[in-house]
Image: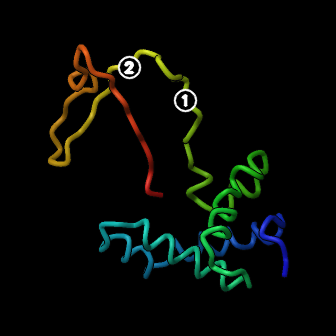
């Protein structure tokens, strides 16, 4: 079996994934579902299987790390929209830095700010993530 780190295979997989993600059927599913993460897991596991790889969590993680392994490869970067337009970057904050006062939004859409949650004798821990 071919390696899941082979550049040409990964490039083909990313291009196939981009085509699937842009399809009318998948776009409609994105509109209907509240949790797109499960759809993306199924989509990528099916993609792994269609390229002859076992759809394990380990292989899924390897596939998702393509952007790290080929960070400077423009062809890989441009193969799929979620990598091409990824604005994620390593942040400047470190442990014990002062938290910046940023805008936050409640689920009902109302706005507050981070420093409103800070209390005098209580640490503030901020955990962020993305479901995509």
Q: Residue at x 43, y 71 (%)?
A: 38
Q: Residues within 10 Å of mark 1 (few under 14, many from 20)?
A: few
| Looking at the image, residue 84 lies above or below residue 43 | above
Q: Residue at x 32, y 72 (%)?
A: 33
**Picture residue at 71% right of the left edge, 49% below the top:** 68
Q: CA distance from mark 1 to mark 2?
A: 12 Å
In the image, residue 45 lies at what x, y percent? 58, 77
Horizontal relation, residue 121 to residue 17: left or right: left
Label number found at residue 91: 1
Residue 106 lies, in percent from the top left, at: 20, 42
Q: Quadrant of residue 37?
A: bottom left
Image quadrant for the N terminus?
A: bottom right
132 displayed left or right of 28: right
Q: Position of residue 20 (x, y in %)?
A: 55, 77
Check disc 2 and report the residue beneath it: 100
| N-terminal label among 1 and 2 | 1
- With 4 as the anchor, is 46 left or right in this view? left
Q: Point out the residue furthest to the front here.
A: 121
Instruction: Count neighbours of disc 2 (C-alpha within 10 A) and say few if under 14, some if 14 to 19, many if 20 or more.
Output: few
Figure check: 73 above or below 116: below
* Foreground pick, 125 / 106: 125
| Residue depicted at x 43% and y 56% | 131
- For residue 104, which quarter of the picture? top left
Q: Secondary structure at mark 2?
A: loop
């Amino acid at each position: 079996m071919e390696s899941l780190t082979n550049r040409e295979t990964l490039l083909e997989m990313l291009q196939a994934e981009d085509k699937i993600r842009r399809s009318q059927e998948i776009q409609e599913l994105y509109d209907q579902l509240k949790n797109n993460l499960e759809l993306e897991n199924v989509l990528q596991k099916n993609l792994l299987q269609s390229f002859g790889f076992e759809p394990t969590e380990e292989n899924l993680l390897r596939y998702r790390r393509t952007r790290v392994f080929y960070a400077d490869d423009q062809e890989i970067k441009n193969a799929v929209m979620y990598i091409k337009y990824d604005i994620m970057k390593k942040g400047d904050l470190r442990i014990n830095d002062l938290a910046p006062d940023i805008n936050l939004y409640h689920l009902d859409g109302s706005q507050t700010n981070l420093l409103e949650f800070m209390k005098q004798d209580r640490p503030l821990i901020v955990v962020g993530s993305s479901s995509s």
